[in-house]
Structures are given as C-alpha cells and as structure tokens.
Image (cartoon, grey):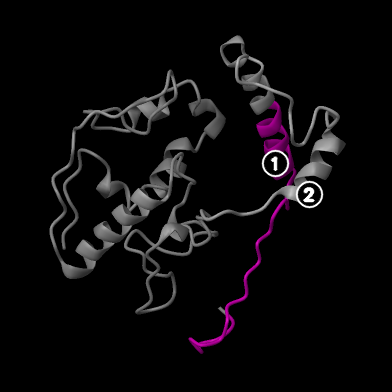
Amino acid sequence: LRSKDPHQHPSILFNYMSSEQDWSEFRAGIRITREIMRQPALSAYAGREITPGQTAQSDAELDAFVRQRAETAYHPCGTNAMGVGAMAVVDGAGRVHGIEGLRVVDASIMPEIVTGNLNAPTIMIAEKIADQIRGRPALPRSDAAYFVAGNTPARRPAGSESLGPLLSNDHSDSLGPTAQEQLLNRVPFGSADNLPGSSPPSQ
C-alpha cells in the first residue's frame, strides 16, 4: 500500500524470475514435459514439438524461451502469506499484522501454492474466516479419505491425529532441524492449537 488513501493504486512488484530457483524450475518443467511425451503410451499422440522446439536444448536456450514467453495466467497466490515469520502478512484469521480492522481473505494469504486449482481452496478460506468473524463454531473435523498420488507425502493422512506422518516421511530431512517449528508456523487458520486432534479454539 502506498498510503492510507483507499483510492490510491497499490505498488505491485511481480518479481518474476528473480531467483535462480525460478529459472531452474521452468527448465525442469520443459524437460519433464518432453520426457512424458516421449513415453511409449503417448507415441500415437505425440507429433513434433511446436514450442520451444527441439532446437532449444541448453539452459541458455530454454532461458531465452522462458524470458520471451512466460506469463501469469489467472492464478497468482501467496503474496500476503499467512503466518508468523518476517515475510508473513496476515495471521490465522486473515488479520493484517500491525494494522487494526484490516483483513485479507483471498488466495493471496495461502502460505504455500496448492497443487490444484485455486477456486475451491479460496472459497474454503473465505467460508472459514467468515465463520470466525461471525462467531460461528467450527464445523466438525472430517475423516473423509482423499486421493494421494503414489508415495507423495500428505500433510495428514485420513484419520491421522498428528503431524507425525509428515515429519517422519522421507522428505522431512530436507526441512532441517526446525522442521516441526516451520510446519507449525504454517498451519492455516491459527497456531498449533488448531492442529488435528486438538480442541477447537474459543470463539
């Protein structure tokens, strides 16, 4: 925000391709797509590569393609992340840190990019925070099963009452010695008190 004037346009910094990770992930996406299309099961449907074209193979060539063609399409999120760290903007109820009477309730408060379309999660966020604002009790926790692709680690397998499966999976070492603290700081809609298995927060 540039000022307290609600009619003044905000300052927006997109920060596209501002780190090496941005570039490496785009390159990896192109190369994985090529690998998928080379599989025998897709041979009947795979023609010549249209873009960026087989001549683009090196990192520099792929970077040039990304620089020219990459763009945002419909689903940006996470620019006002929920959490407690230095980069967090809102708390678990969507309240902006340090500013009274201001909430953000949309896809921008997601602390991590979800792995599917943003529409349903954004509706869920709005419904949840709307209930908090209106003082409505939380809905009962669901134990419905959900799909997990292969061995992809899930945040909480159906019926689990703890973070144990996440902290003990094969990927937990990459989170470093403060993994549990980092995870608890990212728990949506509050703190560790809102983890599965805990009592609902007082209204």
Q: Amino acid at mark 1?
A: Gln
User: Which residue shows up at 17% across the image and 50% down it?
Assistant: 200
Please give the residue where the numbered disc 2 appears in the rendered image: 67
User: Which residue shows up at 60% across the image and 15% down it?
Assistant: 44
User: Which residue shows up at 32% across the image and 62% down it?
Assistant: 93
Q: Amino acid at mark 2?
A: Arg
Disc ID at residue 21: 1
Quadrant in the picture for the N terminus: bottom right
- Image x and y of residue 122, in percent: 36, 55
Question: In the rendered structure, which segment of residues is drawn in magenta?
Answer: 2-31
Look at the image and say whether residue 149 sits in the magenta stretch.
no
| Outermost residue to the top | 40
- Image x and y of residue 189, in percent: 31, 54
Circle 2 crowding by C-alpha within 10 Å: few under 14, some 14–19, many from 20? few
Disc ID at residue 140: none
- Examine the rendering and report whether any part of residue 83 can be seen: no
From this view, report whether residue 119 is shown above or below residue 31: below
